[in-house]
Image: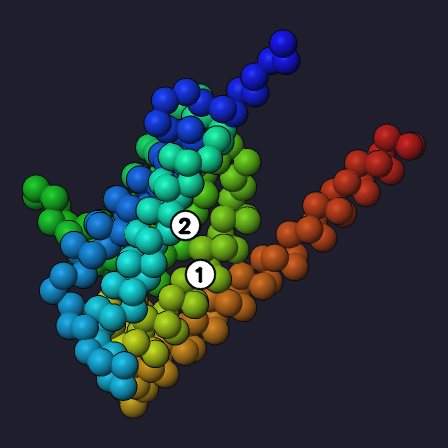
Amino acid sequence: MPARSDTHARGPIRGPRSVAGGLLLVGLAALALYLTRDLSQGTLRSMGPGMVPRMLAIGLGLSGLVLVGVGLVRAGHPLERFSLRGPVVILLAIATFALTIRPFPLGGITTPGLGLLGAGPLTVVIGGFASPEGRLRENLVLGLGLTACAMLLFGDLLNLPIPMFPEAYAALFPDGWSQDGRLRVTAGLLAGVAVALLLVGPRRSEARIGVAGQSRGA
């Protein structure tokens, strides 16, 4: 008799990986809805700060339910060996963002309020090391690019009450500059640094490889 495939699990859960992923998405969606419960919804003509996050959370939750349903009716892959590195690093990144986006009292000390300008790249850089393949330069490029997009989206377009940068950084701009102007200039600087790192990094690596090859040939 031919051997049965390992992907066909016994019991009501035929695709454990799909079910676990779906439940995780549903949990994240529920958390997002809870955290945005106090934000006003608004209307389609005048969107409030809570409309987009809630719509994204609902979409995320529906996607999770679809994954759960697929895992119950269709055979899939079993869960892989669990590693603590990913969850621990991701939780550390989330805690870093929460503690640095604005001043947070911890006993007798208060964490610095870096705003999205500092907390965004720092969070992405730390979270990128959840994978063993994470590299500092790639994480930094991603963090700077995502932070620039987030500043334009949440600060400039949606005008959400999120701390964007430290007070010391804001004081560097002339008094006549508007908040939107500061956001756009800062986002442009972040994007420019990200592009520069993206372009300069591979050239340096290639140059090092070339020098190493010449020294071996000699």
Q: Which mark is residue 172?
A: none
Residue at the (28%, 58%) spot, across then down: 58
Q: What residue does disc 2 label?
A: 124
Residue at the (31%, 40%) spot, across then down: 23
As rendered, which of 24 and 149 lies closer to the eye? 24
Q: Secondary structure at mark 1?
A: helix
Q: Earlier in the sequence, mark 1 or mark 2?
A: 2
As rendered, which of 184 and 152 lies closer to the eye? 152
**Any part of residue 114 in sight:** no
**In-image side of 193 versus 206 (left or right):** left
Could you tell me residue 172's position as x and y percent? 33, 75
The C terminus is located in which quarter?
A: top right
CA distance separating discs 1 and 2: 9 Å
Image: 147 above or below 61? below
Q: Which mark is residue 146?
A: 1
Q: Amino acid at mark 2?
A: Val
Could you tell me residue 130's position as x and y percent? 43, 36
Q: Amino acid at mark 1?
A: Leu
Q: Secondary structure at mark 2?
A: helix
Cβ atoms at labels 1 and 2 below 8 Å apart: yes
As rendered, which of 54 and 67 lies closer to the eye? 67
Q: Residues within 10 Å of mark 2 (few under 14, many from 20)?
A: many
Q: Residues within 10 Å of mark 1 (few under 14, many from 20)?
A: some
